[in-house]
Amino acid sequence: MKKPIRAAVAALTLILFGSVGHFSLAQTAAPMEHDGKGGGHHGDHAGPSSDGAFHKRFDDAAKWAKKFDDPERDAWQKPEKVVDALHLDRAARVADIGAGTGYFSVRIAKRIPNGKLYSADVEPDMVTYLGERAKRERLANLTPVQSSADKANLPEPVDLALVVDTYHHIGNRTQYFSALKSSLRPKGRLAIVDFKADSPDGPPVEHRIPPEQVTKELEAAGYSLVEKHDFLPRQYFLVYQKRD
């Protein structure tokens, strides 16, 4: 009788531990991540989280620069047309939130020679890279800013905050952008550019945020939609103004 009992115990042990092992793998499997072709980012970027954000790390600036600043991106990102649509005064104060390697920051800084461009990012390596790039391209009006997951940390109020391909990375968005209002001047604007559901780039489809939801969240945070641009093939482009 001992052999059948031992065999039964061994079989039960295998089933139990096998199930536990399978469960552990299911819980720790890495989620699908996007490779940052869009160019913006925020938070710790490690995967989906309970705060409504899609997180992924972008801690190797030199590597990501090859993707973020790929000349082929210009064809669908249309950076100059985006900046044109922002109607910036030459002395404007602007914040690029989730600036990455400076794809938009550099272009905007050149458009506001008498103004100030704050390039904010949560990744220390990106902030260092932005400072080096500003020196390399002789952009004295570009200042890198170390932001955090819940605060942009801008040193002064700005006329416009630009958030490109980064909105879906931000957790607790209504709270985040409500707090950002104090960093916007009276009638200050907030421009959001992020991925459409059918874009070949961007996060997994289930983590993309439709423009209707963006407007709902930002209205709750104290903003009103004032402009909507449809010329970007892969992204929506919305401009809001804070309600004073």
Image: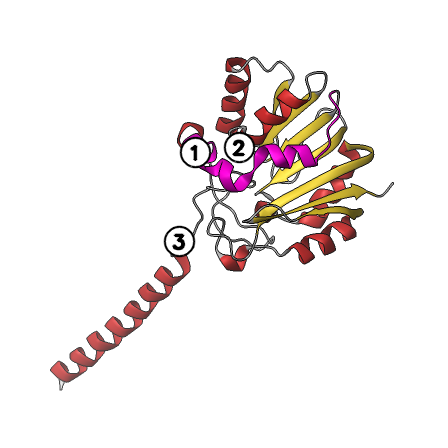
Which structural element holds mark 3?
A: loop
Q: Is residue 79 magenta?
A: yes
Q: Which residue is mark 2?
A: 100
Residue 129 x, y percent position in the rendering? 49, 23
Q: Secondary structure at mark 2?
A: loop
First to last magenta residue range: 64-90
Marks 2 & 1, CB-CB < 8 Å contact: yes
Name the residue located 61 percent from the left edge and 30 percent from the top edge. 120
The residue wearing badge 1 is: 64
Residue annotated with mark 3: 30
Residue type at the position of mark 2: Gly
Q: CA distance from mark 2 to mark 3?
A: 23 Å
Query: What secondary structure is found at the residue carrying circle 1?
Result: helix
- Dividing the picture into quadrants, the one containing residue 135 is top right
Residue placed most toward the observer, 106 or 118: 106
Q: Earlier in the sequence, mark 2 or mark 3?
A: 3
